[in-house]
């Protein structure tokens, strides 16, 4: 979760800022606490440097997150302003949840724009990444992978509800076979947003499910899940 720093404060308002760098971009988020209204307000999110392709891709997110985009071409800066109906929040945690969700998808778009793959290249990339099996036979894609880790065996199945570069959700099913590390693995993945469906300690079996916002970019979904499983293995081995 992102951290905020207090930049300025007076009798009427406190200004919060969060800055970080990712994929060669500098991202700045600003919010204020209006002491008269007793409300928090998200002012803007800025991204630089940015190009026109990235600006075009960002419009995919505008219907759901309800923001407008201003592109300063000379400075190569994208300014994202929340619409009036979504700019006010009761607390900083609510702003953080909104921004975290939005930024994670923005990072997907930035990553995709720097290395777009043709449909014919996706399967090769996933296989070379370490054993993902992709099914593109239907209108929507699915894929699975089996991880043979030191902590146990994990089978992950992923289903998309939308096509690539459409905002939607990815559904992830996780089946774990482990003995001593079962509870650790379940708890670690639960902390990453998965829900426990079934757990049998005596059999060493657990089933978890999760739904996450996604733009349907399969290679980035695989990379994210690989990271989650690797972190789980390190924590529980």
Image: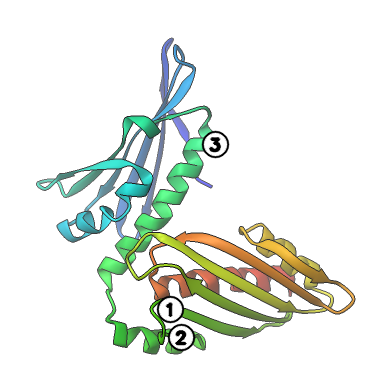
Residue that numbered label 1 is attached to? 141
Question: Spatial distance from mark 3 to mark 1, Cα to Cα?
Answer: 34 Å
Most foreground residue, 52 or 26: 52
Question: Spatial distance from mark 1 to mark 2, Cα to Cα?
Answer: 7 Å
- Element under label 2? strand
Most foreground residue, 63 or 139: 139
User: Closer to the observer: label 1 or label 2?
Assistant: 1
Residue 114 makes an appearance in the image: yes
Crowding at label 2, few (<14), some or many (≥20) Cα neighbours within 10 Å? some
| Residue at (71% x, 82% y) in the render | 150
Most foreground residue, 191 or 205: 205
Please say if 107 is above or below 65.
Answer: below
Furthest residue toward front: 139
Furthest residue toward right: 202
Crowding at label 3, few (<14), some or many (≥20) Cα neighbours within 10 Å? few
Q: Say which label, 1 or 2, has the lower sequence index.
A: 2
Tell me if 34 is positioned left or right of 76 in this view.
Answer: right
- Element under label 3? helix
User: Closer to the observer: label 3 or label 1?
Assistant: 1
Q: Which mark is residue 93?
A: 3
Residue 197: percent from the left, percent from the top? 73, 65
| Residue at (21% x, 54% y) in the render | 55
Q: Say which label, 2 or 3, has the lower sequence index.
A: 3
Residue that numbered label 2 is attached to? 134
Tell me if 208 is positioned left or right of 218 in this view.
Answer: right
Residue 31: percent from the left, percent from the top? 40, 31
| Residue at (86% x, 79% y) in the render | 203
Please say if 40 is above or below 83.
Answer: above
Question: Spatial distance from mark 2 to mark 3, Cα to Cα?
Answer: 37 Å
């Amino acid at each position: 979760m992102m951290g905020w720093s207090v930049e300025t404060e007076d009798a009427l308002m406190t200004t919060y800022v969060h800055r970080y760098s990712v994929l060669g971009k500098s991202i700045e988020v600003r919010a204020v606490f209006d002491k008269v209204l007793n409300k928090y307000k998200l002012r803007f999110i800025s991204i630089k440097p940015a190009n026109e392709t990235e600006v075009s891709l960002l419009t995919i997110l505008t219907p759901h997150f309800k923001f407008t985009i201003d592109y300063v071409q000379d400075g190569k800066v994208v300014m994202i302003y929340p619409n009036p109906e979504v700019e006010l929040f009761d607390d900083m945690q609510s702003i953080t949840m909104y921004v975290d969700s939005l930024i994670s998808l923005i990072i997907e778009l930035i990553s995709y724009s720097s290395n777009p793959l043709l449909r014919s290249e996706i399967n090769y990339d996933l296989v070379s990444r370490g054993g993902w099996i992709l099914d593109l036979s239907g209108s929507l894609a699915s894929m699975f992978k089996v991880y043979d880790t030191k902590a146990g065996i994990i089978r992950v199945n992923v289903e998309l509800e939308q096509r690539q570069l459409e905002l939607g959700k990815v559904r992830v099913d996780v089946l774990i076979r482990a003995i001593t590390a079962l509870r650790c693995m379940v708890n670690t993945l639960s902390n990453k947003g998965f829900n426990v469906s079934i757990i049998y300690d005596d059999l060493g079996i657990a089933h978890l499910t999760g739904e996450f916002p996604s733009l349907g970019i399969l290679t980035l979904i695989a990379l994210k899940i690989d990271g989650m499983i690797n972190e789980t293995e390190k924590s529980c081995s």
